[in-house]
Image (spheres, helix red, strand yellow):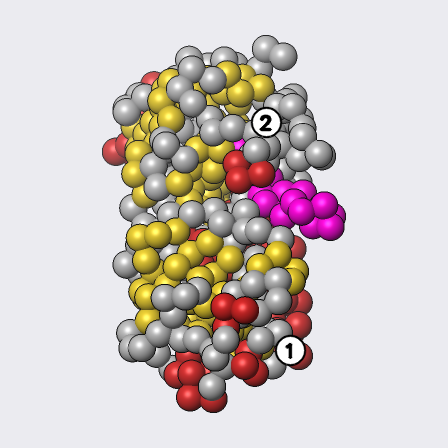
Amino acid sequence: MSRALIVHRAGPAMTLQDMGRPGWIAYGLSRGGAMDRLALEEGAALLGTRPGVALEMAGVGGLFEASEEMRIALTGAPMRATLDGQPLLWQASHLLPAGARLEIGPALSGAYGYLHVGGGFAEKEILGAQSAHLTAGLGAPVRAGARLAVGPDKGGETGRKLAVAERFSGGVLRVVESLQTGLFPEEQRRRFGEEAFVRDMRANRMGVKLTPEGAGYGVEGGLSVVSEVIAPGDIQVTGDGAPFVLMADCQTTGGYPRLATVIPADLPCVAQAPAGARLSFRWISLDAALEAEAAYRKEIAELPRRIAPLIRDPADVPDLLSLKLVSGFSSGDHHDH
């Protein structure tokens, strides 16, 4: 396939990610997929497509070139981006001309940025998805020198932007009780919903470690809990007493006691919390969690209606005088009667 995105430079943790591989947990393979699934939905809305595959950039982007003119969208954690040296707005769609250099630098906030292309990436699928699941040995990081195949694009507008809710600096996470919540002392359960936590430096696609303000958490005999099915959002408490929020590439079973489970609607906030960010938890009922999930799905469905034109600052248009800005003309001495 001739259409390709050429990677001249790549950050250390760059991979292709989509919605993952649901349905394989019985075979020991977790779903995987994008850390911030909402960012995939936002990219699809900007390009007028269905959610597909995007380039996930952890902390820093890279240098890219299009073999042919193509549409792109930038979502997730805002990163410093330029096109042939001219700044590009994040949370927006743009036209990437053939041969132009798209440079994406470090994240300005958040943790994971996403580069989408019109037509979608068209690399080989493994078990029904293009997502790299490195802990399971599926796929590989994207390296400098790669030519990522891009599918045909039906076309559409560019120069569109999307206002998104702030989810790139921590915040309050809604949680429901998990299977072992009742094993934790009442004082710990209460404190868990009151104190703040700091996102530890130790975090990856498997999970995010949180350091509590006060004493650690734990249950009597907690390290002998029977191993059972776990899922993204579950909060395990390891031997050092620190909560660990399981994320996209988590294992499928585990024996650490689970204190709570973050609802799916709030997992993007966990994924995007940078090191040092403050997070806290709020207990909600299962009914409230289902209502939150319904509201989240409605918000996603309404994303296309929130797309707005991207108004460029004339100062950022180097060839402004060569553009046809209006049709018609006036002699300057015309008077209406």
Q: Is residue 181 left or right of residue 58?
A: right
Helix, strand, or loop for circle 2?
loop
Picture residue at 42% right of the left edge, 88% below the top = 187
| Picture disc at residue 286 | 1
Say if 59 sits above or below 291 in the image. Answer: above
Secondary structure, magenta segment, majority class: loop
Q: Give the residue furthest to the bottom.
A: 186
Give whichever of discs 2 and 1 has the lower sequence position.
2
Number of other residues with Cα within 10 Å of mark 1, as a class: few under 14, some 14 to 19, many 20 or more: few
Image quadrant containing the N terminus: top right
Cβ atoms under marks 2 and 1 closer than 8 Å = no
Q: Quadrant of residue 234?
A: bottom right
Picture residue at 59% right of the left edge, 27% below the top = 121
Please name whichever residue, 275 or 290, is drawn nearer the observer in this view of the structure: 275
- What is the C-alpha distance between the residues marked 2 and 1? 38 Å
Tag in front: 2 or 1: 1
- Say if residue 85 shows up in the picture: yes
Helix, strand, or loop for circle 1?
helix
Please name whichever residue, 146 or 95, is drawn nearer the observer in this view of the structure: 146
Q: Position of residue 141 (x, y in %)?
A: 47, 29
Picture residue at 67% right of the left edge, 30% below the top = 126
Picture residue at 36% right of the left edge, 31% below the top = 11
- Which contiguous range is marked in magenta? 16-33
Q: Position of residue 7 (x, y in %)?
A: 43, 20
Please name whichever residue, 225 or 242, is drawn nearer the observer in this view of the structure: 225
Q: Amino acid at mark 1?
A: Leu
The stretch drawn in magenta includes residue 22: yes
**In this figure, which residue is indicated by the disc labeled 2?**
121
Q: Amino acid at mark 2?
A: Phe
Number of other residues with Cα within 10 Å of mark 2, as a class: few under 14, some 14 to 19, many 20 or more: many
| Picture disc at residue 335 | none
- Say if residue 74 shows up in the picture: no
